[in-house]
Image: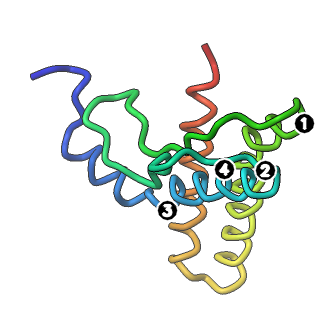
Amino acid sequence: MDKNKISTFWRIFYIATSIGVIAHEITHILACFITKTKVKDKGIVLFKIPKYFGDAIGSVNNYGARGHKNRFLVNISPFFVVSFLSVMSYLIFIKFNSYFFLWLGLSLVFMLYRVLLTCIP
């Protein structure tokens, strides 16, 4: 067995936390819309189960935002939006003791953690 291949446990884990990936990619799409950056045809993959560790589980391919500010917004917007959503989910969980919001918050945090790991060399 290839040691970089993803096991069944991790496949189930990725499916269970897919909402974080989808929220992340939708945030990129919204930032592209706000900055008037064109997204490539068939350039949106909201979620896919990876076969190997390190494979992309979602992507938004665009033609490149014009200017440093727009590029920064498109690239960094998921960090701020998903962080905000995860904190709000946790606060709702505390207030109403709804495990759905605990799962939602943890899914979003997992996505942030995975993105941060890919940014560190």
Contact, mark 4 vs mark 3 (Cβ under 8 Å): no
The numbered mark, 3 or 2, whose residue comes first in the sequence reads: 3
Label disc, if present, on residue 104 of the rendered structure: none
| Pointer 1 with pointer 2, Cβ within 8 A | no
Kindly identify which residue carries mark 4: 28
Residue situated in front as seen by the camera: 63 or 98: 63
Q: Amino acid at mark 1?
A: Lys
Instruction: Identify which residue, 86 or 102, lies in the foreground.
Output: 86
- Amino acid type for the residue under numbered disc 3: Ile
Q: Quadrant of residue 16?
A: bottom left
The image quadrant that residue 64 belongs to is: top right
Q: Amino acid at mark 4?
A: His
Q: Which residue is the site of mark 3?
A: 19
Which residue has dot 1 on it? 69
**Marks 1, 2: nearer the viewer:** 1
Q: Position of 8 compared to 108: left or right? A: left
The Cα–Cα distance between marks 3 and 2, rounded to whole angstroms, is 16 Å
Residue 58 drawn at (x, y percent): 46, 46
Q: Is residue 15 above or below residue 112?
A: below
Q: Quadrant of the C terminus?
A: top right
Query: Are the two marked residues, 3 and 1, in contact with CB atoms closer than 8 angstroms?
Result: no
* Residue 80 circle label: 2
Left or right position of 110 against 13: right
Residue at x 82% of width, y 50% of height: 35
- Position above or below: 97 against 102: below
Relative to residue 24, is residue 33 drawn left or right?
right
From what the image shows, is residue 37 above or below residue 55?
below
Distance of label 4 from label 1 (alpha carbons): 14 Å
Front position among marks 3 and 1: 1
Q: Which kind of residue does numbered mark 2 sit on?
A: Phe
Camera-nearest residue between 85 and 21: 21
